[in-house]
Amino acid sequence: MSKKSRNNITERIIYGVIILIGIAMIYPLIWMFFASFKSNEEIFGSLNLLPNSFNWSAYSDGWKSAGGVTYTRFFLNTFILVLPTTLFTVASSALVAYGFARFEFPGKRLLFAVLIATLMLPNAVIIIPRYTIFRSLGALDSYWPFYLTAIFACYPFFTYMLIQFLRGLPKDLDESAYIDGCGTFKTFTSILLPLLKPSLFSAGLFQFLWTYNDYFNSLIYINTVTKYTVSLALRLSLDAETVVQWNKVMAMACVAVLPVVVLFFCCQRYFVDGIATTGLKG
């Protein structure tokens, strides 16, 4: 057997293993989709992947939700929460990262150490102090706890990621901009920000996914049903009926996960580029 034939066989084996792993990873999504067409008896009493019949009524019935609030309202609430939070996070993290990466100021090392230390804090530790602060500000039962946290760059992971990327960019770019008459902010917006695009896409995608899927913080800060996000609405579907109609829950779960899947596949190239470049420049 020639070397070329062995390489072809090895390549096919590798692709076969990758395909099998991929199928195993997306199988829960496939099962969830087909379960949306099944009755409770089929879901719990049969091991068949395919349903006996395809009835789309679970999607129309599930969309109506409970309490007179439809998933149209829940999705609108979700995007009102997620989109500004994502934009504020990217903007504030980029500004803070620029300060740490390009300037020298008293206490810089200490503040950077504090930034790194906050990466170690679990959300359960800081949720009570944050709740107390937002209660004092009268920001509960609104989306302001999410907005304010993003505006003040309270997500150290993204700040640290952007700092590492900025440190890999040569400072000659800044000096050339200063010679041409640019100030510090103009240098950041016109020279460095375009080069930060892959890393900014990664930070934005991460924050969008995390905020979109966030159940715990939404449950803590939001109390009114008309302000619920999709993650809370899915839980509401379980509590609204004595006997849970799981096909409707699965149908709405499929609809809820669809924007995330589409976003990831559309932005996959930027996501991979951002992670790769940040890792290389770290």
Image (cartoon, rainbow, N blue to C red):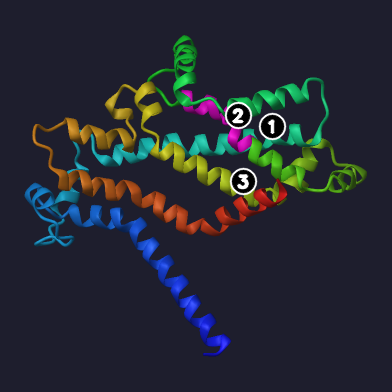
Q: Amino acid at mark 1?
A: Val
Amino acid beneath label 3: Leu
Residue 187, percent across and down? 80, 42
Q: Which contiguous range is marked in magenta?
A: 145-159
**Residue identifier under label 2:** 153
The three-letter amino acid code for the residue at tag 2 is Ala
How far, Cα to Cα, is label 3 from label 1? 13 Å
Judge from the rendering whether residue 45 lies leftward or rightward of residue 260; answer left or right: left
Q: The residue tagged with tag 3: helix, strand or loop?
A: helix
Disc 3 packing (10 Å; few <14; some 14–19; many ≥20): many
Whether residue 201 is in magenta: the answer is no
* Residue at 82% over, 20% down: 106
* Pointer 3 residue: 200
Q: Residue furthest bottom?
A: 1
- Mark 3–mark 1 CB contact (< 8 Å): no
Question: Residue 67, can we see it?
Answer: no
Q: Position of residue 247 (x, y in %)?
A: 16, 48
Pick whichever of labels 3 and 1 is earlier in the sequence: 1
Q: Is residue 229 left or right of residue 14?
A: left
Is tag 3's residue or tag 2's residue first in the polypeptide sequence?
A: 2
